[in-house]
Amino acid sequence: MYAGYTLPIGTKIWSNSGDGSGVSKIIPAVPSPSGGADVFALQNSGVVMALKSDGTQMWSANVGVGATLIPDFQGGLVVAGTSWQRLDGQTGQPTAQLSGNPTLVHADGTIFIDGAISGVDAATGNQKFPPIQTEQGSIWIYDGGNCGEYNPIIRQGPYSTLQPGPGIGQPIIAGDGYAYFPYVWGNETGFENVCDNGEPSGSLHTDFHLRILRVGTDGSSKEITLGDWAMDSAGTPQYNLTTIAADGTPTTIPATLGAANSQISPYALSPVQPVLQRADNSYIGTLLIPGVSQSMIAFNASGQQLWSQPSYTPQIATSGGGVIANSSSGQTVTFDQNGNQTGQMGSLPTQSWKGSYQLGSVDSFYALLAVLESDSYNAVVRGNLTGNGTAMKQATIGLFWCRTGYGASGACPDVNVPDVQWKYLQDVNSQNFGKAIDFSVAQPNSPAHTDWVDSIEAAALDALSRAFDGFPVSVRRVAGRNGSTWECLKQLQQPGCTIYDKDTDRVYVSGAWSTDTGQTTGIPNLGLGVLSSVFYWRSLENSESFLSQNPPFPPHTSSDYAAFAQLLQGIGRGIGNAAAHELGHHVEYTFTISMDCPKVAPCAGNNGVVFERDGGFSEEYKSVRPTIQWQPDSVCAIQQYYNEGYRDKNCTVSKKKSTGF
């Protein structure tokens, strides 16, 4: 048992040793209703395990030692090698096999095959579009025979390279939904071993053409010119390299960035490689000077250097413009938006949408998940938490406890939500709730029950997390942090102010007594997005009614304490499940789904035990998902809401423009 509403940092939650051969790699799965795994773990035996967030093994499959694992957006796993196969997310059984080498997976289920770029349907293995032809130059070299030592010959052939190697840059699927493949082609013409006054001589002219091929999932393509340059027998010109940002925007990187007046070889291309993109569209990348040094470097969209730190490699762009990086000596260090070191961590865990993991066996442990730069399409290496090369915004849901003092996130005057009061009264209602007693502080004949606060908050976060299990969004309890001087000044506050990292969606727990006859009220905050609140008092009232638990306070007997334990769980579940309902309204603001059934329309399926149901109902306080379910249209809409590129041929919901609930 631990005191507090969260576990101590580093607490091991569970461990799975698999077949005992050791785990060599842990890769987060993309949460999906058609999947179920939170991570895939590759063992030294070549067997991969699909593990849920609670440590339960869903399936295992022998994929071979050293296999490349690429999670897709339907919850499955693409296994790449000389041939490839896709394993179903629920069963681990192969669903498609094909020759070629997959390099990128799209959220709509398209797999891009590298080399001669083609597209394949992940579900069936059928080709979606044939290989796309890229430009190709030639080599034409005349050999003069070295002053008669041998017969003259001519060397000729194609000159083109479509490569995802580090010299040119990795291909990505950007936030605009297109795949971008860098390549270079050129022409070489010249003479070798031509007799000049009895001495062999020669000349060579080369022209290079750096391009990016933009490819859609329908096979449409467009060539983007990044640079053209020529080189004769001696000398290498400077040039600027244009890169494609994670949102699909071209950005020019001067050859001199980070290395003033340096001469950059067109074979090595730019020594600066963008790795992460921040919300302000600036970048954090690496500056590599072979044989000399490697630095972490920040630069803006115009190619202007902002700061650099030697011997670091960026890993995660965090909220507020900061970064988590690994040092060359193996340390994990945090930096603020200006490149100043702010702290040091243990080894960087593998972070999934639902938890944190470390190698050994597969060890799940409690960690404060890094709050990623929410408006960035590339806040982590290779686009998203799986590292599969697809850029996507990392979505979060925040549960905000409006109050000061114990169990608090902070006061909420900006959204007009009064503080939660940790109070209790038998048979509470709208007429007598003012007589309730605060159990979080000591009372006559009763100690302070902060442990009751912990139980309510833990149950609420658990219920809300379970409601969105299977969707690519992380659920967190909102907590403030000390802001840097720059962050506070930006918000017109004094240095040392409290900063709340941005969430995709947030629900506020309110201390008001709702005048709504139902359980909750959604609050559209016009101009600032959609904000919602849920009500502590309603959850207390409904828990007493539906659970038939309203023991006396202070409790005296073991039965009283047992009744309070059930009641506290019910209050927390009610808050968490009600928050899920309100977030359904957030989705409804964008997609055509039916909320507040059966008042608006009949509830679809599961005997009406659905999150869309209006008002309080008993299962909301007794159970969590999967006992309570989302309606089919909502499942599809939520998946698209938190992953813009997700597509499902069975999904028929459409986007809309709404002004409220």
Image (cartoon, helix red, strand yellow):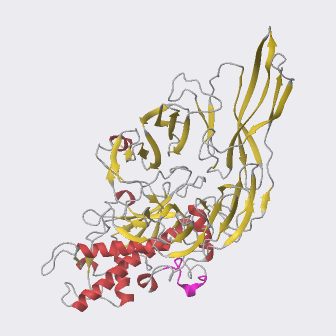
Q: Position of residue 525 (x, y in %)?
A: 47, 59
Q: Residue furthest toward the top?
A: 197
Q: Report if residue 200 is visible in the image.
A: yes
The quadrant of the rendering that contains the C terminus is bottom right
User: Image check: 372 left or right of 554?
Assistant: right
The quadrant of the rendering that contains the N terminus is bottom left
User: Image check: 255 left or right of 156?
Assistant: left
Q: Is residue 223 above or below residue 454?
A: above
Q: Is residue 436 above or below residue 506?
A: below
Q: Is residue 590 above or below residue 208?
A: below
Q: Position of residue 193 (x, y in %)?
A: 79, 19
User: Image check: 221 left or right of 419?
Assistant: right
Which range of residues does the magenta coloring cover? 602-614
Q: Is residue 368 above or below residue 606?
A: above
In terms of image quadrants, where is residue 411?
A: bottom left
Q: Is residue 419 magenta?
A: no
Q: Position of residue 262 (x, y in %)?
A: 55, 24
Q: Position of residue 203 (x, y in %)?
A: 76, 18
Residue drawn at point x = 56 percent, y = 88 percent = 607
In terms of image quadrants, where is residue 63?
A: bottom right
User: Image check: 41 left or right of 547?
Assistant: right
Q: Is residue 612 magenta?
A: yes
Please state which of residues 337 and 234 is positioned toward the viewer in this rendering. 234
Residue drawn at point x = 53 percent, y = 42 percent = 281
Q: How many marks?
A: 0
Q: Residue furthest toward the left?
A: 444
- Identify the main secondary structure in magenta: loop
In terms of image quadrants, where is residue 202?
A: top right
Q: Report if residue 593 is visible in the image.
A: no
Please state which of residues 444 and 519 is positioned toward the viewer in this rendering. 444
